[in-house]
Image: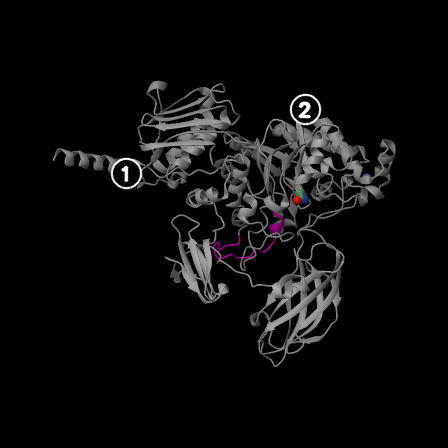
Amino acid sequence: MKYLKKLTSLALWLMSCTCAWAQPVSIVPQPAHIEQQNGSLTLRADMTMAYSADCQPQAEYLRKAILGATAYNWSTAKKKSRADVVLEIDARRVTAAEGYNLTVDRRGITICAHDNGGLFYGIQTLLQLLPPAIHSKALQPDVTWQVPYVSISDAPNRPWRGMMLDVARYFFDKEFVKHYIDMMAMYKMNKLQFHLIDDSGWRLEIKKYPRLTEVGAWAGKDQNRLGGYYSQDDIREIIAYAAVRNVEIIPEIEFPAHMLSAVVAYPWLSCTGKQHEVPRQHFISRDLLCVGKESSYKFLADVLEETVNLFPSQYINIGGDEAVYDRWNECPLCREVMKREGIEKASDLQGYLTNVVANMMKAKGKSVVGWEEIIMRGEVSQPVVAVIWHEVADTIKARNTGHKAILSPATNLYLDFPESKTPGEIKAATWMPPISLEKCYSMPVNDYSSASTVLGVQGCFWSDQFIHGTILQELTPLNENRSENYAEYLSFPRLLAVAELGWCSNATRSWQSFKNRLSKQYARLDYKGCNYRVPEPEIVKITEVGDKVRFELAPSVEGATIRYTTDGSYPHSHSAVYTEPVTVERKTDFRAITEIDSRHYSLPLYFAPDFSAYKQYGNFVAEWKPVDLASGKGTWRFETTGTMVGNGTYDITFVRTRGAKSLALGKLVQYKREEVLASLPQSAAIGGDNAIVTYRLTQEAFEAGVPFYIEVETESKGGATDTYGYVFVKKID
Ligand code: ACM
Ligand code: ZN
């Protein structure tokens, strides 16, 4: 009997442990060291906080973060020893910059940090230990605010964990910029390259040059004008908001190219002095800041003076990308500078200009950062930081010339590219292949040490895909044409991958672990009011069973439902719910979606047809189906952006694959946006014995980031349109 009693109490004790054992800790980015203990602390309204004066901004942040969802208004403790929550900065106890130690036990919560940044990050980790509803600004009355007992010690591996936000092509207002900063900070990112200037808009108020924003910030005229700018007061507000969150706002003042908006305001800035207009479509101007006029240097000095006075950042970004040097070559004043300085190539004038500005900035105690071109056009004697956006291997050039580098390769970290080629995927940049979440996460980067050339990583969010006036694709999960939603859809969840790439050492980073932890973050994004791309269900395994295929799936969003079809149709909110592996006849018949709620679901899992039988025709570009074609005569248009990359000669081959009718193909026209580039007359029946037609086309005006189309005349023989086929493209030279 005694034995039985003992056993019962043991069972009860075990049960109490299981109940008190909160969920396993799941944080993004993954902390360096976590020890989870048995049990959890439940937050209460009467808790008190203790902190010294230097912790005040972050203490206020925490108080407010807790208040919204819980309505607990924590007071300040009279004595540290009596406080439930202790915040302190002690650089001797926590030695790594931006590092923190967080302890949660039965006595309460302690965050001890190296600096204010580390303290903010300790608070972010604490918030992620709480239920997702903690991120709500509105009261969440039915939640028990449990925090597991843990002890976490954490610090970033890399000092530079950045995002570039392009507010020049599309003007995101102050509130959106703050929201974007808040999201970056939640995931411990610390640098915002604020792309304030481009051909399509000047967004920063400069008091000495009022026309920059009176004229250069606007495309179009009067009430129909589009654009906007930040007043210097707006900028101060953004900087203060970011400072509490440990985000350094680095202004990017673009020159010598990508500054047509300034040239529109002050035509004397360019070599030709010609009057232009602020463009309403994506456009990279060939006009450069003239390096032969004294007024150009005065302009730069004045603009940078106001910029430096406004932005407390250590770094000033001077842009510098994508200049073409014809104007400098043709300009007598620029040629005089070349002669005077013994410069042979016009492109090396960029290095000359970079040196002038780097010296100006050094005199003001600032460091210069810019796109990789700033270290690749002539010699630059001051050490600068280059944002490498093409080849990661080019960091070697930075090292050999005494500079530092940030990795921001377009192939992995440009978040304005879509994640997939799935039909229905968001319309976004196409000058390179899509960038999946895994491709973004898995970018190779060495661990940081103080001797490293590479300071860290940076994601880039360009907005030239929705420059002012662009009609955006309406996506079902968005149901509205808002650029801000578009920007979030493209940025999230990949921004979390960039954040972890920056924060974690290679030993701590794991794709499998990231996917598991990410599945729990979507609810947090929802409470933060942040849109995101809902991920497709995860494929655990695909097995061939005889002549059938068996799919085993798992949710990629915690708590979401998977719905599927087996007839190739698009699943919807009444489709079958996935509960166990599904076997189908053909792989392409199976489609499955992640459904978070009836308005919030993913694209379906998509298995592209197998093109291996058509290898000799090159790369797949487009597919036609009966619904794409007019019955009788018509035209069919498809996009070649990203598949005909670069100038050269291409074979464009139409291959009919099935259908009862034949198709005649006529004139083929190539467009760059709406401009006709080439027109090839050809007429051939495609169908029956003659199922393949090839056109040879020479592309001469390729430009990255600009949409290219092909339109072909079609005639469905016999009136009906029962014809299916593919188009392939092969580069000949
Ligand atoms: C860039 O993508 N032009 C830096
Ligand atoms: Zn010039």
Whether the residue under disc 2 has CB within 8 Å of ligand 1: no
**What range of the chain is rendered magenta?**
462-481
Query: Image check: 34 left or right of 351?
Result: left
Which class describes the residues within 10 Å of circle 2: few (<14), some (14-19), or many (20+)? few
Q: Mark 2 points at which residue?
A: 364
Residue 702 spot, x, y in % from top left: 73, 54
Q: Name the residue under label 1.
A: 19
Query: Which residue is at a point 50% across and 34% down the rendered structure image?
Result: 188
Mark 2 or 1, closer to the camera: 1
* Residue 302 visible from this viewpoint: yes
Depth check, front residue: 416 or 327: 416
Query: Image check: 589 left or right of 650?
Result: left
Helix, strand or loop at mark 2: loop
- Mark 2 to mark 1 CA distance (whole Å): 59 Å
Compared to residue 467, the image places residue 121 above or below, namely above
- Location of residue 682 (image quadrant): bottom right
Depth check, front residue: 588 or 476: 588
Q: Which part of the image, by quadrant, shows the C terminus?
A: bottom right
Residue 240 spot, x, y in % from top left: 53, 30
Task: Name the residue type under label 1.
Answer: Cys
Residue 478 part of the magenta-drawn span: yes
Helix, strand or loop at mark 1: helix
Where on the image, by quarter, is ligand 2? top right
CB of mark 2 within 8 Å of CB of mark 1?
no
* Residue 371 visible from this viewpoint: no
Residue 244 part of the magenta-drawn span: no
Residue 377 spot, x, y in % from top left: 76, 37
Principal SS element in the magenta part? loop
**Mark found first going from the N terminus, 2 or 1:** 1
